[in-house]
Structures are given as structure tokens and as C-alpha cells.
């Protein structure tokens, strides 16, 4: 029977030492073809440092597929692209073993087993090695926010206790104060106010802008085609998007209703038609 494969990619911020997601995918597809397997699904995450494993959208989708039982193999480029810490890898391997799912690494093209895991890790959580059993305990604990990827305006990082009563940091959640500002922006624009006017009001009110910068019309307006700017970020309706991959549902992160989002998109469409005959911008 042909095995169905979930290919997991995690992009790297250091492409000199680690293959980028596109390279990982190239080698993964070649390996799957060589083995005569069937690629069923591709899950991808960005490299955001030491964040809790299950907070990553690609991992969330992977875990959903484990529950569904639709795959036979998880294939990553190297083990550190999937799990940066031994404790996480051990827990994942136990789950895979119970469900009869294999874990393979395209580089160097081997099946990874639980008994081999300790040989992949050192005290450097991101460095898999061979032939060494010297390692230090890596606590699944708090991590500094500045080590994580910056979030969209309106969100912050938080933590939660797991079943072992360990505090795990790295979950993204709406931030009450700035999330309300995002709601105001969408409502004000939908009601006819220009991004420049909204920015002026926020500056006069002393509202902190994204990354503590001053408000500007461009910050709010952005570019609809490129999905930049607050009015075009679909995370506000619970959809995560990265170039080169499909949307990922993240309903818990929703700040804006579908109705309000539609009103904003409709006004943007009218504004785009009017811009063709007028130098002014909404």
C-alpha cells in the first residue's frame, strides 16, 4: 500500500546554515518520489525561535491530521526543523508510535526512532548531532518576548500551564487595548473616514502606534494587493497567510467581524475605482 505523507517545513532565518523552506520542499518531494510514496499535505511554519511547539499553525495542522489518521508518514528535512528540543521530540514520537505513524528525515533520508533521539540533541537546542550523549536539560519554560517574531498590531504573546503544570510561553492572543484600536480603525474607515484622518485622530489622542511608531495613513491603508497595512491583514478575521502557502484558520485570533471586514473591502473597491480619475486617496 502506498504511504501517504505529510511534509513539514519550517523556514529558517539563517539560510547559510539551514535550508530555506523552498529547498526543504524540493528535497522532500524528491525523497517522496524516490520512495514511491504519495504526498498528502504540506504544513509550513516560519522560524520564530523558542516558541511553544503547539503554538505554531503548521504544527497545529499536523496534530489535527494525527487525530484524523489520514497520514502514514511525517517527513521533515532534518529533525531540528520539526522539533528544536529533545523533550518535545520524545512527546511527539510517543504520539506517533501510538498511532502507527512513521517519522522520517529527508536529510539524510532515514527513519527516526525514539531510541535514536538522544543522539540528535546537545545543550544547543537547535543543533542535532551524531555520536554524543552529552546534553543539558532544556526546560519547557518561559522565553523572552524579544526572541520571538513581532506580532501584528492588536496581538501579544502569553503563556499557559500544561498538564504537567509547566508554564509554556508563546501563545498568540488578542491584546485588549490595541485590539480595540484595530476595531476602531475598521469601523472608522467603513463609516467613511480616510486613513490619514484616522491617523491624525490617534496622534492627537496619544494612542501608541505599531511598534510605538507614529501613526500614518500608510500604516493603516497599506497595499491591498500585497496584503500590507492594518486594513488588509486577514489575521484580524482569523486567517493567517504567508506568501507561497494557503490560508490557515485561526478563529481564536479574530478581532473583526466578517460583516465589518466586508464593508471595508467594499469601500476599498469603490476607492480604487475613484482613484483612477482622481489624485486624491481615501
Image (cartoon, rainbow, N blue to C red):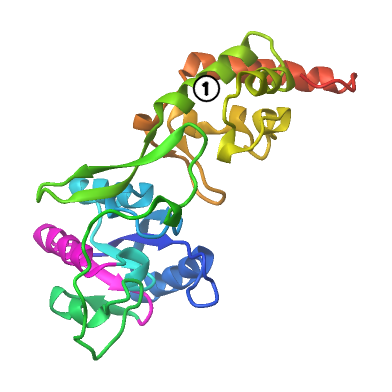
Q: Would you place residue 209 above or below residue 267 in this image?
A: below
Q: Position of residue 122 (x, y in %)?
A: 27, 79
Residue shown at 28%/80% (left/top)? 110
Q: Which residue is mark 1?
A: 181
Q: Would you place residue 1 above or below residue 146 in this image?
A: below
Residue shown at 54%/71% (left/top)? 15
Q: Position of residue 107 (x, y in %)?
A: 38, 79
Q: Position of residue 224 (x, y in %)?
A: 67, 32
* The residue stretch that appears in magenta: 85-108
Left or right of 92? Residue 54 is: right
Left or right of 172? Residue 209 is: right
Residue shown at 25%/56% (left/top)? 71
Residue shown at 13%/78% (left/top)? 115
Q: Quadrant of the N terminus?
A: bottom left
Q: Position of residue 210 (x, y in %)?
A: 57, 36
Q: Of residues 25 and 168, which is closer to you in this image? A: 168
Q: Is there any visible trace of residue 78 in the rendered image?
A: yes
Find numbered disc 1 in the image and state the secondary structure of the residue it sits on. Answer: helix
Q: Would you place residue 188 above or below residue 172 in this image?
A: above
**Dot 1: few (<14), some (14–19), or many (≥20) neighbours within 10 Å?**
some
Say how many tags the image has. Answer: 1
Residue 97 covered by magenta stretch: yes
Residue 102 covered by magenta stretch: yes
Q: Quadrant of the C terminus?
A: top right
Q: Of residues 197 and 245, which is closer to you in this image? A: 197
Amino acid at each position: 500500500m502506498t504511504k501517504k505523507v505529510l511534509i513539514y517545513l519550517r523556514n529558517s532565518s539563517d539560510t547559510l546554515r539551514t535550508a530555506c523552506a523552498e529547498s526543504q520542499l524540493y528535497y522532500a518531494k524528491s525523497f517522496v518520489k524516490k520512495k514511491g510514496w504519495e504526498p498528502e499535505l504540506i504544513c509550513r511554519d516560519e522560524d520564530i525561535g523558542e516558541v511553544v511547539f503547539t503554538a505554531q499553525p503548521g504544527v497545529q495542522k499536523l496534530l489535527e491530521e494525527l487525530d484524523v489518521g489520514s497520514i502514514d508518514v511525517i517527513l521533515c528535512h532534518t529533525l531540528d526543523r520539526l522539533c528544536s528540543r529533545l523533550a518535545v521530540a520524545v512527546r511527539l514520537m510517543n504520539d506517533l508510535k501510538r498511532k502507527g505513524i512513521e517519522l522520517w528525515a529527508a536529510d539524510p533520508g532515514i527513519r527516526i526512532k525514539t531510541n535514536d533521539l538522544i543522539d540528535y540533541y546537545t545543550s544547543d537546542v537547535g543543533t542535532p548531532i551524531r555520536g554524543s550523549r552529552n546534553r543539558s536539560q532544556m526546560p519547557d519554560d518561559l522565553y523572552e518576548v524579544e526572541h520571538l517574531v513581532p506580532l501584528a498590531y492588536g496581538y501579544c504573546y502569553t503563556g499557559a500551564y500544561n498538564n504537567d503544570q509547566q508554564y509554556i510561553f508563546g501563545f498568540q492572543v488578542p491584546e485588549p487595548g490595541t485590539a480595540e484600536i484595530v476595531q476602531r480603525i475598521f469601523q472608522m474607515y467603513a463609516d467613511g473616514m480616510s486613513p490619514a484622518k484616522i491617523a491624525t485622530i490617534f496622534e492627537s489622542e496619544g494612542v501608541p502606534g505599531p511598534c510605538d511608531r507614529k501613526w500614518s495613513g500608510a500604516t493603516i491603508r497599506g497595499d491591498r494587493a500585497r496584503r500590507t497595512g492594518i486594513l488588509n491583514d486577514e489575521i484580524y478575521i482569523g486567517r493567517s497567510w504567508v506568501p507561497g502557502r494557503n490560508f490557515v484558520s485561526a478563529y481564536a485570533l479574530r478581532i473583526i467581524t466578517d460583516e465589518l471586514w466586508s464593508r471595508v473591502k467594499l469601500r476599498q473597491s469603490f476607492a480604487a475605482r475613484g482613484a483612477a480619475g482622481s489624485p486624491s486617496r481615501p
